[in-house]
Image (cartoon, coloured by chain):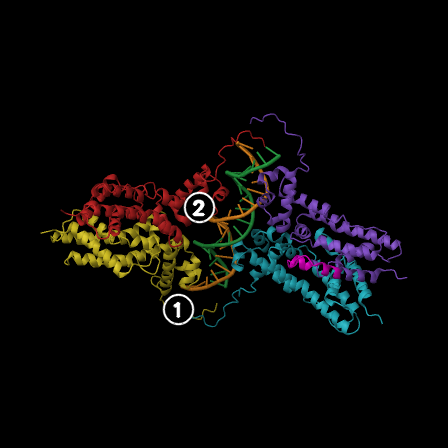
Chain colours: A yellow, B red, C purple, D cyan, E green, F orange
DNA sequence: CATGAATGAGATTTCATTCAT
DNA sequence: TATGAATGAAATCTCATTCAT
C-alpha cells in the first residue's frame, strides 16, 4: 500500500531472473519424476519454493512451463557437447561417445527426460519432435558426419552413415537402457558400461572398418 | 424353478463375456493413445460403448483396468510367438525375427504399448516389471538361447549371448523406432524395414559369424 | 418360454412369502447397523441372500423397504408386550417394566432401532412419528393408564400420570442408555440394570406413593 | 522485497478466517439437518456460500469437516457454561440447570447436534465418544460434584451422586425431548419446561432431600 | 418370480487457473 | 512482482434402480 518509493532496480528482465530459474529447476524435477499429468502445479510450486500464483507470472500455463523444461533439456543437456573431432580415430571417438551417451540416457537420480518426453509425444507432437530433433537426430547427425569424415579418411567403409550412427547409438544401450527405464534399475555401473560399449565398438569396427 | 433342462444361456461367465472384451478393447485404445493419466474413465466408457458404471462392474478401479490391458499386451501380443528353431541358420532366423520385432514395437494404427508402459513404469513398478519381463527380457532370452544353440552348432562365436541378443534387437530398430515414437511417424514401410534388418544381420554376422 | 403348464400353486401370497421374510430379516440387520444412508441395497441383498432385483419385486424402493422394517420394529418389538395388570402393586410392576424397557432400548448385538429411527426422523417425519407413537408414546400411554389405575386404587397420588410415566421411563435409562448409544458400550449387565431400576422405583415411590 | 514496515493485512491466518467460519456455519446447518450421509459437500458449499473447492482448502475431507463441527458443538455449545455454585441451595440450582439443559438439547431452529452425533456414533466411535464425554458425561459429572457438595452440606442424602445426576438430567427431558426429536415438534414452550422441570425438582427432592 | 448385468445420476475430491491485495 | 485464497470444471467412483431373460 505504502510502496515506499518505487526504487526497485530495473533488474529481473524476465528472461533469466532467479525466480524463473527457481521455477524451472523445481518444475524439471517434478515433471521428470512424475510425468506431465502426474505433476501438479501445486507440487511444482512447493518444490520450486514459490507460490502457485508466481508460476503464472512467468509461464502462461502448465503446458508452456513443460515446453520450457523440455526445451532446456533438449538444448542444454541434449548432448550437443559431444566431441566429434574428425581427425581422431574411430575406436577412441566411438568409445568416448558411447560412454557419454549412456550418461545422457541413463542419467542417475531418477527423472528421465527421454522417458518423460516419449510418454507425452503423441499428445504433444511439437514437443516430441523438438526433443527428438535436438537430442536424438542431432546426435545421430553429428555422429554420422564424423563417420563420413572417417570414411573419407579411408578408416571406415560405410554405405549409409546415418543408419550406422543410429545402429551404434542403440547398440551402446544394449542391456542397459530398458532395465533402467522399465525396472527402475539404478544407473549402470561404469564396469557394465565399459563392457557394453567395448562390445559395441568391436562389433561396429568388425562390420565397418576398412581392412587394408 | 422347474427350468427343465439347464438350457440357460452362457450367462456371461464374467471371464470372457463380450462386455468385458468390449471394455478391454476400448480401454486399450484410449490408454495406449493418451497414457494412464491422460485417459479418463468417461472417455474409455464412450469408446467402449458402455456406461461408466459398467466399467466398475468388471474392474475394481482404473488401475486394475489398466493392469488388465497391460497384462494382455504383455502375454498376448508380447511376441511370445517368435519362431526360434535352433536347427535353422542364423541369417534366416535373425532376419525373420528382425521383421517380426519391428512389427511388434512399431505396430501401426497408433497406440504404442511399449511407450505407454514405459511412461508409467516409474510410478507403477510392478506393471513395468511385468511388461518388461514378458516382452523385452522374454524375447531377448529366447533369442539368446537360439544364439547359444548356433554357437554350439559352430555357426557363431559369441562370448555373451544375452548381450548379443540385446544388441541385435536394438540394431533392428535403428532409425525406425524412435521416429515412430517421437515424431508420430507412421509405421515404417516394408522396404525400410528390409534395409535396416538386412544391415543389422550383416553387421551381426560380421562380428559373430565363425569363419572357417 | 415353454412355461409347461402354469401349475404354480397359488402360494406366495406376496404378504408373508419366505422371500419377503428373508429380505426383511437381512434389511433389518443392515439398516439397523448402518443407518438408512449407510445401508446399500447391494449389501442388503447380500445379507438377505437374494439378488438385488428381487428386492424390487417385493418393495418399490429403498424407502419403502425401510418403512416396512421400521413398521415391523414398531409394531412387533415395540414393547406392546409389557404386562400392566392394574391389579398388581406399583413396586413390582414398575420394577418389571423397568427391566423390560431397558431390554428394549439397549438390545444387545448392535443395531439399535431407536437410534436408527431417531437419526432419520427429521428427513422422514412420517416414519419418525409412526415409530414414536407405537414405541414411545404407546408405552408411556399404557404405563400412564396403569398408574391412573393405581391412583384410583389409592396406592399412588399423581397429578399428571402421563408426565409421571415419562419420568419413570427415562429414569430407568439413567447412566445406561446414552453410553450404550454413544460409546458403543455393551448392553448393560443385569446387576447394573437392577441397581438403576431399583433406584428409579425408590425415587418414584418416594415422590408419588400415597402415604397412609 | 523491500516491504517497508510489515503492514501486510491479517492475511487470513487460516485459523479463524471468515471463510472458515462461513464454511463451519453452513456445514453445521446442513449436517445437523440431514446427518452425515444425507449432507452433500455440494449442498454445504451452496449453503455456506463458497465453492466446493474452497471446502477442501480448509478441510481435508468430508469427515474432517464433520469432526470440526462436532468438536465445536461439543466444546462450545456443550453446556460447559452451567453454573454450579456449591454454596447455593439445591432447589434453585437444579431448577436453573433443568431449564438450561432443555435449552441445550431442544435447541430451536432444527438441526439437533445430539441427534446427529447419536446417529453416526456407531460408525465413528471417536466422534461419538468425544461428544459424549464433553456434553453428556461432562455435564453429569459437574452436576454430580455439585450434588456431593450439597450432601456434604447436609442438604441432601445421596448414595450415588453420579446416578442421581443422570436421573435428574433425564427427568428434566420427560415428555419434551423425544417428541422434539421424533415428531419434529417445535422447541417446548417456557411454560411446558417450567412444569416439567418443577416436577423433576420436586421428585428429586422428595427422594434425596435430607429431612430434618 | 428371480436374476444380475447394465445404467446414469450424483457423490467426493483434485487441480489448473484467476484475482484482489 | 509475488502471493495464496478462491474457483469450477472435470475426474474417479458408488449405488439405487431397471430390464431382458
Which chain's residue wears label 1? Answer: A
Residue D100: which quarter of the image? bottom right
Q: Which label was assigned to residue A174?
A: none
Q: Judge left or right: residue D138 versus residue B143.
A: right
- x 21%, y 47%: residue: B152
Using the image as rendered, state which of residue B87 and residue B15 is in the foreground: B87
Magenta residues, dominant SS class: helix
Q: Which label was assigned to residue A8?
A: 1
The answer to whether residue B94 shows anywhere in this view is yes
Q: Position of residue A130 (x, y in %)?
A: 30, 51
Q: Are marks 1 and 2 in contact (CB under 8 Å)?
A: no
Q: Which residues are magenta?
A: C178-196
Using the image as rendered, state which of residue B105 and residue D186 is in the foreground: B105
Q: Judge left or right: residue A23 versus residue C48.
A: left
Q: Position of residue D169 (x, y in %)?
A: 74, 62
Using the image as rendered, state which of residue B88 and residue C70 is in the foreground: B88
Q: Position of residue C14 (x, y in %)?
A: 67, 35
Above-or-below relation of A13 to B65: below
Are the residues under marks 1 and 2 on the same chain? no
Q: Position of residue C23 (x, y in %)?
A: 63, 42
Residue B76: which quarter of the image? top left
Task: Report if residue A206 lies within the magenta region.
Answer: no
Q: Label 1: state its secondary structure.
A: loop
Which chain's residue wears label 2? Answer: B
Residue located beneath label 2 in the image = B65
Q: Judge left or right: residue B210 versus residue C212.
A: left
Residue sitting at the far front: B152
How packed mark 2 is, by other alpha carbons closer than 10 Å (few <14, some 14-19, many 20 or more), is many
Amino acid at each position: 500500500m505504502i510502496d515506499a518509493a518505487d526504487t526497485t532496480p530495473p533488474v529481473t528482465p524476465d528472461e533469466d531472473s532467479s525466480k524463473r530459474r527457481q521455477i524451472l529447476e523445481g518444475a524439471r524435477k517434478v515433471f521428470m519424476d512424475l510425468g506431465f499429468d502426474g505433476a501438479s502445479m501445486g507440487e511444482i510450486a512447493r518444490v520450486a519454493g514459490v507460490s502457485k500464483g508466481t508460476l503464472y507470472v512467468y509461464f502462461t500455463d502448465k503446458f508452456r512451463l513443460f515446453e520450457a523444461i523440455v526445451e532446456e533439456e533438449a538444448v542444454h543437456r541434449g548432448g550437443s557437447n559431444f566431441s566429434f573431432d574428425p581427425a581422431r580415430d574411430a575406436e577412441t571417438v566411438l568409445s568416448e561417445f558411447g560412454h557419454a551417451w549412456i550418461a545422457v540416457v541413463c542419467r542417475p537420480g531418477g527423472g528421465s527426460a527421454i522417458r518423460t518426453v516419449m510418454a507425452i509425444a503423441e499428445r504433444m507432437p511439437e514437443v516430441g519432435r523438438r526433443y527428438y530433433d535436438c537430442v536424438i537426430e542431432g546426435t545421430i547427425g553429428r555422429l554420422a558426419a564424423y563417420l563420413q569424415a572417417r570414411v573419407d579418411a579411408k578408416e571406415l567403409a560405410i554405405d549409409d552413415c546415418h543408419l550406422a550412427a543410429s545402429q551404434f547409438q542403440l547398440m551402446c544401450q544394449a542391456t542397459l537402457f530398458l532395465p533402467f527405464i522399465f525396472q527402475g534399475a539404478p544407473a549402470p555401473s561404469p564396469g557394465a558400461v565399459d563392457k557394453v560399449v567395448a562390445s559395441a565398438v568391436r562389433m561396429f569396427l568388425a562390420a565397418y572398418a576398412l581392412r587394408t
